[in-house]
Image: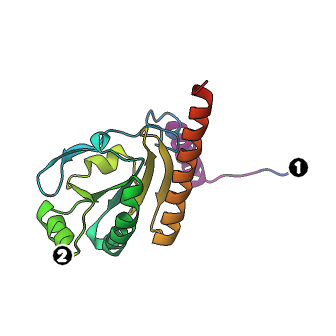
Amino acid sequence: MRKFIFSSSSLVLISILASLVFFAGCDSKQQIKIGDTPPVISGKDIYGEDMKLIKLKAKLFIVFFWTNSCCGDSVKKLEPFYRENKENGLAILTVNVGDAKEIVESYAKNNALSFTMLTDEHSKLFKQYQCFGYPTIFILDKNWIIREKILGDIQIEKLQNIVVKQFKIQKEMEVNYEKIHSR
């Protein structure tokens, strides 16, 4: 029969790990996930205009959390994608985390960005949406339900495929609803 001998440092490490597992399970905040209704976003956009995401009329929303230090090129690539799809009911809201409003406004003007942009200098929205890194992208349907959550950078073509898929799903749901309720 074998005997296991633990050193005092091993026992301390085991105790710490057990405590972390126990207390992690007690966290009252649940991760925001697909199928959830996210926190409301409102405030002033980079041009000082009042903005409430819930008041934007669209069939599909992209909420894109970013920072200048890593995601500026990705944000620029959203513009042609937005222009191609806004007539189909796409709205894009980018939330810059940590940079001053003047910096984001200058960036938007220099790159001719026409979608809605907010700044989150103190990371309030970033924390409410439980983001861990940049970029973090949420795709919401017209009923404010999260349909996709993308962590990290994504090629515009892949994002476009996801959006097209979500538009098709919404269209199918509308057709099915009409079939059921037209009787």
Q: What stretch is highlighted in magenta?
A: 4-23
Of the two numbered discs 2 and 1 in the rendering, the one whose residue sits closer to the viewer: 2
Q: Name the residue under label 1.
A: 1
* Along the viewing direction, whichever of 42 and 19 lies nearer the viewer: 42
Position in image of residue 46 (x %, y %): 16, 57
Which residue shows up at 47% across the image and 44% down it? 146
Confirm whether residue 155 shows in the render. Answer: no
N-terminal-most mark, 2 or 1: 1
Instruction: Please give left or right for residue 108 compared with residue 5 in the image.
Output: left
Instruction: Please give left or right for residue 69 compared with residue 180 in the image.
Output: left
Is residue 8 on the magenta stretch?
yes
Tell me the kind of residue under disc 2. Asn
Q: Mark 2 points at which residue?
A: 110
Position in image of residue 34 (x %, y %): 52, 44
Compared to residue 132, the image places residue 34 above or below, namely: above
Compared to residue 104, the image places residue 139 above or below, namely: above
* Along the viewing direction, whichever of 53 and 99 lies nearer the viewer: 53
Position in image of residue 63 (x %, y %): 37, 53
The secondary structure that dominates the magenta segment is: helix
